[in-house]
């Protein structure tokens, strides 16, 4: 998974969306967090998912709240697609390929992680942001197929 911004550094790094964190009992400050998206750069893999992480838009002192959310995933296809992919597709790598929103396998289920999951769940109710993820996914795949490495 490579950040969209690393593949296309010429596109301003402003995040796909900025969300104001709602009041919560877990000490996550109610400030703006930017959503950064990352995609699989394997040209032979059609995993149709995005990895998402939220980062505070203003510097946070240590102890004032999470410097980032956990790594979250969103797969926009139906569950059957990922099931078939797992059966016939290429190696799944170290990321999750699952329909809907899920937590990275390396992360633990904490109230804060579930809180950010819920924020993502609400965001993807907007078809526009789902369309945006799909568009950016295709851009990254196109780039990967041309044989250019993200760092070049
Ligand atoms: Zn993939």
Image: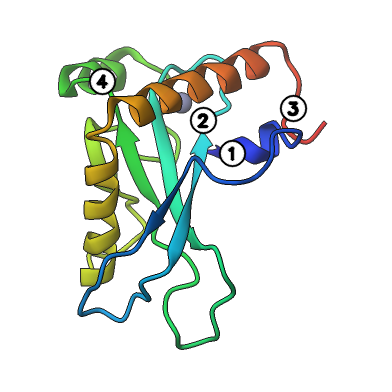
Residue at 65%, 45% in the rendered image: 13
Q: Which residue is mark 3?
A: 149
Q: Determine the secondary structure under disc 3.
A: loop
Q: Is mark 2 within 8 Å of ligand 1?
A: yes
Query: Which circle marks residue 2 in the picture?
Result: 1
Q: Secondary structure at mark 4?
A: loop
**Residue that carries the numbered disc 2 in the rendered image:** 40
- Report how far apart the C-alphas of labels 2 and 4 lie in the structure: 15 Å
The mark that comes first in sequence, 2 or 4, is 2
First in sequence, mark 3 or 1: give its number: 1
Q: Residues within 10 Å of mark 1 (few under 14, many from 20)?
A: some
Q: CA distance from mark 3 to mark 4?
A: 27 Å
Q: What residue did someone put label 4 on?
A: 77
Report the Cα–Cα distance between label 1 and label 2. 6 Å
Question: Which residue is at a point 24% across and 72% down the rendered structure image?
Answer: 23
Find out if the beta carbon at label 3 lies less than 8 Å from the nearest ligand 1 atom.
no
Tag 2 secondary structure: loop
SS for callout 1: strand
Using the image as rendered, state which of residue 138 and residue 144 is in the foreground. Answer: 138
Callout 3 crowding tier (Cα within 10 Å): few <14, some 14–19, many ≥20? few
Sooner in the amino-acid sequence: mark 4 or mark 1: 1
Q: Where's residue 52, x and y in %? A: 42, 45
């Amino acid at each position: 998974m490579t950040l969209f911004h690393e593949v296309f550094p010429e596109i301003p790094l402003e995040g796909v969306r900025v969300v104001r964190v709602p009041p919560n009992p877990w000490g996550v400050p109610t400030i703006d967090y930017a959503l950064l998206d990352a995609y699989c750069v394997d040209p032979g893999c059609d995993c149709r998912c995005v990895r998402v992480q939220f980062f505070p838009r203003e510097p946070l002192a240590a102890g004032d709240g999470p410097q980032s959310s956990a790594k979250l995933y969103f797969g926009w296809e139906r569950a059957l697609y990922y099931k078939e992919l797992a059966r016939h597709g290429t190696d799944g790598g170290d990321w999750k390929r699952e329909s809907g929103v899920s937590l990275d396998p390396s992360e633990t289920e904490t109230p804060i992680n579930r809180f950010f999951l819920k924020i993502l769940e609400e965001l993807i109710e907007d078809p526009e942001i789902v369309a945006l993820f799909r568009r950016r996914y295709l851009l990254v795949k196109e780039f990967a197929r041309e044989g250019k490495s993200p760092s070049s």
